[in-house]
Amino acid sequence: MVDQRSAVAVIFILLLLFESTFEQLETLSSPNERAALLELRSSLGLRSTDWPIKSDPCLVWNGIRCANGSVVGINISGFRRTRLGKLNPQFAVDSLVNLTHLASFNASRFFLPGSIPDWLGQRMLTLQVLDLRSCSISGAIPPSLGNLTNLISLYLSDNGISGTIPSSLGLLPLLSVLDLSKNSLTGSIPSSFESLKNLSRLDISSNYLSGSIPPGIGTLSKLQYLNVSNNSFASTIPSQLGDLDSLVELDLSSNSLSGSVPPDLRGLRNLQKMLIGNNFLDGNLPVNLFPAPSQLQIIVLRHNNFTGPLPDVLWRMPQLSLLDISVNNFSGLLPDSSSNANVTAAELNISLNLFYGNLTPSLRRFSSIHLSGNYFEGKVPDYVPSNASLDGNCLQDLADQRTVVDCSSFYAARGLNFDNFGRPNSTQPRAPETSGKKNKRTIILAAVLGGVGLILLLALLALLVLCARKRGGTTNQRGVGVGPVPAGSTPPPPGVSINLSKLGDSFTYQQLLIATGDFSDANLIKNGHSGDLFRGILEGGIPVVIKRIDLQSIKKESYLLELDFFSKFGHSRLVPLLGHCLENENVKFLVYKYMPNGDLSSSLYRKSNTEDDLQSLDWITRLKIALGAAEGLSYLHHECTPPLVHRDVQASSILLDDKFEVRLGSLSEVCAQEGDIHQSRISRLLRLPQSSEQATSGALTATCAYDVYCFGKVLLELVTGKLGISASSEAEMKEYMEQTLPYISIYDKELVTKIVDPSLIVDEDLLEEVWAMAIVARSCLNPKLSRRPLMRYILKALENPLKVVREENTGSARLRATSSRGSWNAALFGSWRQSSSDVAAIPAASATKVEGASSFKQSGTTGSHSQGSGPNGGGDNSSSRRRYSKDIFPEPSDVQDVERQDQD
Ligand SMILES: *[C@@H]1O[C@H](CO)[C@@H](O)[C@H](O)[C@H]1NC(C)=O
Ligand SMILES: *[C@@H]1O[C@H](CO)[C@@H](O)[C@H](O)[C@H]1NC(C)=O
Ligand SMILES: *[C@@H]1O[C@H](CO)[C@@H](O)[C@H](O)[C@H]1NC(C)=O
Ligand SMILES: *[C@@H]1O[C@H](CO)[C@@H](O)[C@H](O)[C@H]1NC(C)=O
Ligand SMILES: *[C@@H]1O[C@H](CO)[C@@H](O)[C@H](O)[C@H]1NC(C)=O
Ligand SMILES: *[C@@H]1O[C@H](CO)[C@@H](O)[C@H](O)[C@H]1NC(C)=O
Ligand SMILES: *[C@@H]1O[C@H](CO)[C@@H](O)[C@H](O)[C@H]1NC(C)=O
Ligand SMILES: *[C@@H]1O[C@H](CO)[C@@H](O)[C@H](O)[C@H]1NC(C)=O
């Protein structure tokens, strides 16, 4: 009996073992599924190191999970595509429909450009987990996803998804995780969300959502994590949120919420993080908002309009690691009781409030303390760490405190006595003395600056007179002086005025602080040479880029030039200036429209997958960008009078909106082209130090030809996909051009394939366009500035790239170049061909043979003349073109050998 039983047990155990071994060694039994996987493998371009074609997917392929002989899980997260797969990456997952048991599809960090297919929601009904984070998905969320009733986790964050959140998502009864953060979603939270009874995590942060937060969210009793930050939610915080007693983290920050904090939030007994900063909340905090045994670790209430005292309990929370209530109107004394907590790594920020009285031992436990901008008085106790920020208070024996008048009137208004910085009333108060000194210093500084400023002003005056468009005698009533003289102290000299009404809205410093979260590092885009750029969200949820120009480190002239430029010129190809904030004397702010696609240097490739697996812009988009930039430059060069030079043409100056339309940025160095003598003197006065580029290219930066040269580098960057060419130093550039330019020949299309960006798909038609752009690039990079083409011809060439290469090959170019009705195309390439054939005949003499280009000096003069001679220069005037054709248009002087070989 016993033996029998143990035998049964042994058999049972063996069976179990067999079962589990069997599961481990499970093979794919369905030929249909195998075919589907192979199809998926090829449509996504997966590598054989991940999915080796001959072996069994269940046994060998990475990221495939099988059960009962069927595929139940696919994880291609972070996979790299094959070289071929990279050529035409698409959201091509059609064959998934034949994996009839698939429960989980994880393609996070795998590049899937395109929108989520509608059939996914209709056909993939077995899905439980769908993870498409960071896949570069665009388009809207298909409402059909509401049919995936088995879905437990849906991750779509960090894509370019737009449109509204479909209310059908509320139909997913099992949904536990919904992450739609970091997209471009608009509209409001569907009220259907209150049906998501199993939801534990809801993240819709960093979108453009608006409306109010639906009270129904409060019924989601399993919710542990709720993040709606960085949207435009308005109205009040619904008191029903207090019913979320599983909630661990609540993030409502950076919205437009207003009203007071509902006392019901004390129901959040498990809350560890409460983030409600950067809103418009006001009123007092409810006294018992924070229940006594609290889990709270992080409380951020910063940048609201809270008033009244801070509940004492906040100072005693055992777990607290960050309490940030800065920039509010909280008031009152610090609690007297010494908290017996030991010093922790906790941080306290109560700066820019209305706290007063003495510093107390309640501060003891914090290792990082920010108290500046309050009305604290008395001595600083020893336990306050030396790196604490204390300025702007009424503290004794400390620099950078408020004045006696300020302090005593604050205290008097509350019926209190100010300790007068610890000095008896009779002696001379110290503060006015220092402020007197300060005043004197300001006066001296103003005088010195004024002197420098006067010179600048004179220079500017002259420039403005020359630069100014016909004004038709209108005067600027709203003009305000922006010279180096402190605003308001001296009326601006007549004539030097910048019309602020043309510079968008006037913002207050406070508005910009709120918009950028105090210019926090998290919002810093980059430290540009003309100022620091920050991302920000204005009231109403408008995303912007704000340039902070600290005049102590940035040359004032570049800021003035930029203001001047924007007040006079505007074009759809230039980045829109939305407003400014000039109220601060030393720090100025310009507010630009936010460009969702950043600049060309950052979006030519987007890091989407693993480190070295980058997605790149397709050719159509690249051509569109080249065209857009050419339009912008063509406006500056040919439509402004006098012609304006951008002087900072490089990939990072080419900003891209949501549709990859170009908006030229970096406009702080725009200046009038050096043409006649008066102008050049002034521009020389204002010009920044010349870069080494000019030396080699033989050009001053203040000529249109310099822009053309730089634009050539940008084109080369677009063609070759080599990042950073347009920003490279002249030495690097020279070396690079030596390697690259020999492969650009108007006689051999195939040569160019050697330098084309390998991540571009190049079919025959496209290759011709690529080839054409390469040819234009090379024309622009002609070392002799006089032979670089005019921007308007470059524009024409880029508008008709196929014409560039096809007409050239018909052999009629030469004829056209010399005919009086010659086209831009013939103009651009006729001379190249002509001179190339000349060169082919007499190689050695080529350089000097070309008339008008025998010396740099001479070519420089003719160059700037033809570049800057307005609508007629180099235009249809055939005699002048004949005369200058060889000077103005490109000729491959440095790489003729290759071309000659090609001709042979
Ligand atoms: C495998 O098949 C058995 C019997 O048909 C079923 O009970 C089990 O749930 C299946 N396993 C999976 C993971 O589908
Ligand atoms: C998914 O695949 C990646 C890459 O092979 C691997 O690093 C990761 O651990 C997998 N994730 C899961 C949840 O299996
Ligand atoms: C699914 O399988 C069927 C039958 O093998 C096949 O005809 C069909 O093309 C497959 N569908 C896709 C999208 O691969
Ligand atoms: C998908 O794979 C990534 C990489 O391994 C992993 O971090 C992530 O948690 C997975 N997603 C899901 C829903 O399991
Ligand atoms: C899927 O959802 C869409 C929209 O919610 C609906 O119109 C459609 O009938 C559903 N399809 C199926 C197969 O349930
Ligand atoms: C803050 O509240 C005060 C009154 O308490 C009000 O005067 C002020 O306008 C409010 N500020 C903002 C920015 O809402
Ligand atoms: C402070 O630290 C000491 C020694 O590490 C410990 O004995 C004491 O309990 C701590 N006090 C508190 C309130 O945590
Ligand atoms: C100092 O003078 C102010 C008014 O000038 C008065 O309100 C305050 O009480 C005096 N303080 C002391 C310590 O005498």
Image: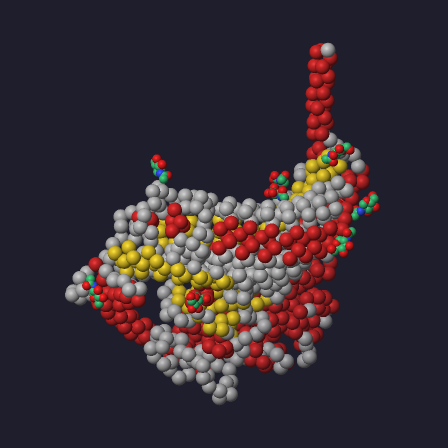
Q: Is residue 122 visible?
A: yes
* Residue drawn at the location 69% of the way across and 71% of the way down: 813
Q: Nearer the viewer, residue 862 or 286?
A: 286
Q: Quadrant of residue 634?
A: bottom right
**Number of marks in the rendered image:** 0
Q: Is residue 300 left or right of residue 741?
A: left
Q: Quadrant of the N terminus?
A: top right
Q: Nearer the viewer, residue 455 or 879?
A: 455
Q: Is residue 246 left or right of residue 332?
A: right
Question: How far from the left and from the top, in percent, is residue 54?
Answer: 75, 36
* Residue drawn at the location 34% of the way across and 42% of the way down: 340
Q: Quadrant of residue 624?
A: bottom right
In the displayed structure, would residue 51 be above or below residue 119? above
* Residue drawn at the location 31% of the way across and 60% of the way down: 375
* Residue drawn at the location 42% of the way across and 56% of the way down: 325
In the displayed structure, would residue 825 be above or below residue 133? below
Q: Is residue 702 left or right of residue 374?
A: right
Q: Is residue 516 visible?
A: no
In the displayed structure, would residue 78 be above or below residue 417? above
Residue found at the far bottom of this picture: 473
Q: How is the image coloured?
A: secondary structure
Question: How far from the left and from the top, in percent, is residue 682?
Answer: 42, 76
Question: How far from the left and from the top, in percent, is residue 742?
Answer: 61, 58
Question: How far from the left and from the top, in percent, is residue 532?
Answer: 45, 62
Q: Nearer the viewer, residue 312 or 685?
A: 312
Q: Quadrant of the C terminus?
A: bottom right
Q: Nearer the viewer, residue 595 or 888?
A: 595
